[in-house]
Image (cartoon, grey):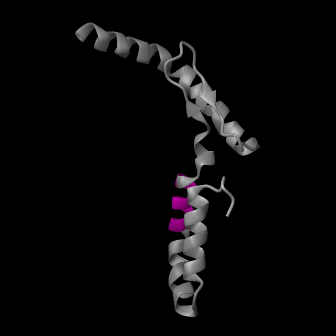
């Protein structure tokens, strides 16, 4: 298994291998496959882009070192949402409120 393999793909692969052990388990797995695929997709790190860095004055998003074009696309989308939502400004406001109370 590759070190960069997503947990979603790992779970999907492991479940699929387990369900292919015999004919009855394969038959029982057929109705489950759409749910297994949805679960694998929600657990796939590539769907979420990179990591957001806090403690900076501008939005910073770092992509994973093994990023491919798919992950990089989602990293850019994540950065766009971060800017559109004015996340840094909102965090600064909240941190200032907290520091005034302390």
Q: Is residue 58 magenta?
A: no
Q: Nearer the viewer, residue 21 or 35?
A: 21
Q: Is residue 40 magenta?
A: yes
Residue 56 spot, x, y in % from top left = 53, 16
Q: Quadrant of residue 90?
A: top left
| Residue at the (63%, 32%) spot, across then down | 77
Residue lying farthest to the bottom in this orientation: 23
Q: Quadrant of residue 5?
A: bottom right
Q: How many marks?
A: 0
Q: Main secondary structure of the magenta part?
A: helix
| Residue at the (66%, 31%) spot, across then down | 76
In the picture, the quarter occupied by the N terminus is bottom right
Q: Is residue 86 visible?
A: no
Q: Nearer the viewer, residue 48 or 34?
A: 48
25 versus 32 height, above or below: below
Residue lying farthest to the top in this orientation: 100
Q: Which residues are magenta?
A: 35-42
Q: Is residue 54 visible?
A: yes
In the picture, the quarter occupied by the C terminus is top left
Residue 83 spot, x, y in % from top left = 56, 20
In this rendering, position of residue 76 left or right of residue 48 = right
| Residue at the (53%, 53%) spot, across then down | 42
| Residue at the (52%, 87%) spot, across then down | 25
Residue 31 spot, x, y in % from top left = 51, 77
28 versus 57 height, above or below: below
Residue lying farthest to the right in this orientation: 69
26 versus 11 height, above or below: below
């Amino acid at each position: 298994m590759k070190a960069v393999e997503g947990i979603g793909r790992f779970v999907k692969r492991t479940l699929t291998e387990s369900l292919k052990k015999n004919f009855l388990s394969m038959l029982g797995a057929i109705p489950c496959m759409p749910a297994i695929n949805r679960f694998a997709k929600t657990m796939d790190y590539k769907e979420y882009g990179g990591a957001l860095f806090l403690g900076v004055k501008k939005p910073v998003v770092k992509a994973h070192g093994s990023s491919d074009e798919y992950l990089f696309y989602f990293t850019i989308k994540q950065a766009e949402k971060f800017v559109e939502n004015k996340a840094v400004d909102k965090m600064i406001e909240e941190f200032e409120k907290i520091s005034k109370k302390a």
